[in-house]
């Protein structure tokens, strides 16, 4: 019951976030680190920490069985995958469970390809489902999703054309929050992958050393460094030693060394 309540709280909160994505502020002033940190803390607070698969309800209601199939059929066609992503009701834990079970019943490489194409080559109709796509990727946490998280971390496929302007807004907005939360989640997943994968560590190091404009702010670079350090101390030391003495990240990292 506690697990069900936790998952319901998470999905309701995320649903409110999706509902608010349609509008954002247009201020051009630079945000404070405190404002950016509040956004990140809100998305990673222990009170709403994303549960593991076993925390998602395993008892599927009849309506969900009818929609997704009792035997959790594997995804074989990209069109089927996209229809599920677009149609999923993230306020309904059983629907999330059914989608995750279908993902886990599918070939991991095929599923990863569906996620990556959904991010990088969405049609106009699917483009609006990016938040749901990222949400499912985070819950699924498949072994072949590294290119997906790398893309989000490097902002290779940005959510908005003017991301550098959006992250510079003083007042929080749904668009700005979406960008920051995508990066935070991607850093976390790359950090986990980086325990055994050097290329995942290289991506985090690249963000620390070669940020992509304001979207990779000092605070976000610090988040990348912390996840790199958690993955591999030696890689973090090499990255830190490559920073120039006057890099603002140096001062930011003093408590983390």
Image (cartoon, helix red, strand yellow):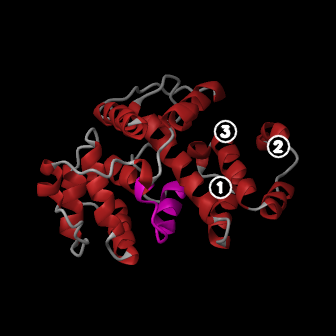
Mark 2 — residue? 250
Mark on residue 219?
Answer: 3
Q: Secondary structure at mark 1?
A: helix
The quadrant of the image that shows the N terminus is top left
Please identify the dominant SS of the magenta region: helix
The residue depicted at 27 percent of the width and 50 percent of the height is 59
Query: In 3D space, how far apart are the residues under numbered discs 2 and 1 (Cα atoms)?
Result: 14 Å
The quadrant of the image that shows the C terminus is top right
Q: Residues within 10 Å of mark 3 (few under 14, many from 20)?
A: many
| Magenta run includes residue 143 | yes
Query: Closer to the N terminus: mark 2 or mark 3?
Result: 3
Mark 1 — residue? 207
Query: Closer to the N terminus: mark 2 or mark 1?
Result: 1
Query: In 3D space, how far apart are the residues under numbered discs 2 and 3 (Cα atoms)?
Result: 11 Å
Q: Is residue 12 visible?
A: yes
Q: Give, as a single range, the part of the protein colored magenta.
A: 138-154
Mark on residue 249?
Answer: none
* Relative vertical location of residue 206 with respect to residue 95 in this rendering, above or below: below
């Amino acid at each position: 019951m506690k697990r069900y309540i936790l998952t319901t709280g998470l999905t309701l909160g995320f649903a409110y976030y999706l509902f608010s994505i349609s509008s954002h502020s247009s201020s051009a002033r630079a945000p404070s680190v405190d404002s950016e940190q509040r956004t990140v803390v809100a998305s990673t607070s222990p009170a709403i920490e994303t549960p593991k698969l076993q925390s998602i309800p395993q008892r599927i209601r009849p309506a969900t069985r009818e929609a997704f199939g009792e035997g959790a059929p594997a995804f074989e066609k990209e069109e089927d995958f996209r229809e599920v992503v677009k149609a999923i009701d993230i306020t309904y834990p059983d629907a999330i469970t059914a989608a995750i079970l279908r993902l886990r019943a599918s070939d991991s490489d095929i599923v990863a390809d569906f996620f990556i194409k959904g991010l990088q080559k969405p049609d106009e109709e699917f483009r609006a489902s990016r938040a749901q796509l990222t949400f499912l990727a985070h819950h699924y946490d498949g072994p072949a999703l590294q290119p997906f998280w790398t893309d989000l971390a490097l902002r290779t496929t940005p959510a908005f054309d003017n991301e550098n302007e959006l992250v510079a807004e003083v007042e929080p907005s749904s668009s700005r929050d979406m960008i920051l939360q995508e990066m935070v989640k991607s850093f976390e997943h790359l950090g986990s992958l980086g325990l055994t994968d050097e290329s995942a560590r290289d991506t985090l190091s690249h963000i620390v050393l070669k940020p992509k404009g304001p979207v990779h702010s000092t605070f976000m670079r610090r988040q990348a460094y912390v996840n790199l350090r958690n993955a591999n101390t030696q890689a973090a030391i090499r990255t830190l030693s490559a920073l120039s003495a006057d890099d603002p990240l140096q001062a930011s990292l003093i408590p983390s060394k």
